[in-house]
Amino acid sequence: MEVVKKLIKENDYITTEWSGGKTTQLFIYPEDSNYDARNFKFRLSSATVELGESEFTKLEGIHRFITPLNGELKLTHNHKDYINLKPFQIYEFDGGINTTSYGIVKDFNLMLGNGVKGELESIYIDREYSLIKENQSNFNEIFYFIYAYNNIVYISFNKEINIIKPFEIFLIKLNGNLDLNLNINSQNPSDILLARIYI
């Protein structure tokens, strides 16, 4: 498999309603899978929480990562213990358990189906950040998603410069036998999110 790269723009996203606001699907895989049918391997989304208190949709069998983008978010699974998240602080949890949120925010989500490994990382770039991946031949497919939030970032990859505007995503897909070496630059301090998914 050759390396695949793709710029995903806001026009490519799909926005729908949920009980607490709006949710925007940024990417789903396989790309012909359906969120409502829960037949995806992984999904990236960004949702607005427009109520002071809301119940998350229960997602049995889905492992979730979440971070607020523009405000503080408080979560609880049992109304006894509370998780307080500031912007770009990441929390992971079982999507099948009851989850209540407090706070009016915009968030970012990574959802992983059964058997899919992955992680979501928040990165603060002051000028430059280098990402180096060593060979991981035990996986068939590896996905990297770089989400720019508040500034334009420049990704140097395979001797090309790729410009990523706020709210856009740069996707790199490769197999486990390939190494990855790229640089991410910004003229201004920038917050980005990096999702890694291993299949």
Image: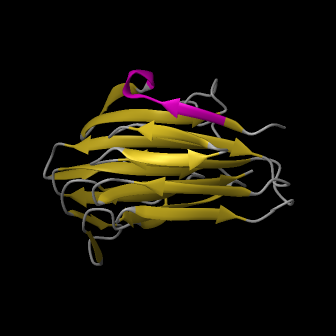
Please tell me in which quadrant of the rendered image residue 182 appears: bottom right
Q: Which of 25 and 55 lies nearest the eye of the viewer?
A: 25
Residue 194 included in the magenta stretch of the image: no
Q: Is residue 6 above or below residue 100?
A: above
Q: Is residue 172 above or below residue 83?
A: above
Tell me: 188 left or right of 136: left
**Rendering colour mode:** secondary structure
Please tell me in which quadrant of the rendered image residue 89 appears: bottom left
Would residue 95 be visible to someone looking at this image? no
Residue 178 rendering spot, x and y as whole percentages: 81, 53
Q: Residue furthest front?
A: 159
Tell me: 73 left or right of 136: left
Q: Is residue 24 above or below residue 91?
A: above
Residue 41 rendering spot, x and y as whole percentages: 66, 42
- Position of the N terminus, as image quadrant, is top right
* Magenta stretch in the rendered image: 5-12
Residue 179 rendering spot, x and y as whole percentages: 77, 57
Q: Measuring 34% from the left and 66% from the top, which residue is drawn there?
A: 126
Q: Which of 154 and 136 lies nearest the eye of the viewer?
A: 154
Q: Measuring 30% from the left and 68% from the top, which residue is drawn there?
A: 76
Q: Which of 88 and 130 lies nearest the eye of the viewer?
A: 130
Residue 11 included in the magenta stretch of the image: yes
Would residue 32 be visible to someone looking at this image? yes
Q: Measuring 33% from the left and 70% from the top, which residue is drawn there?
A: 78
Q: Measuring 63% from the left and 36% from the top, which residue is drawn there?
A: 5
How many badges with numbers are in the image? 0
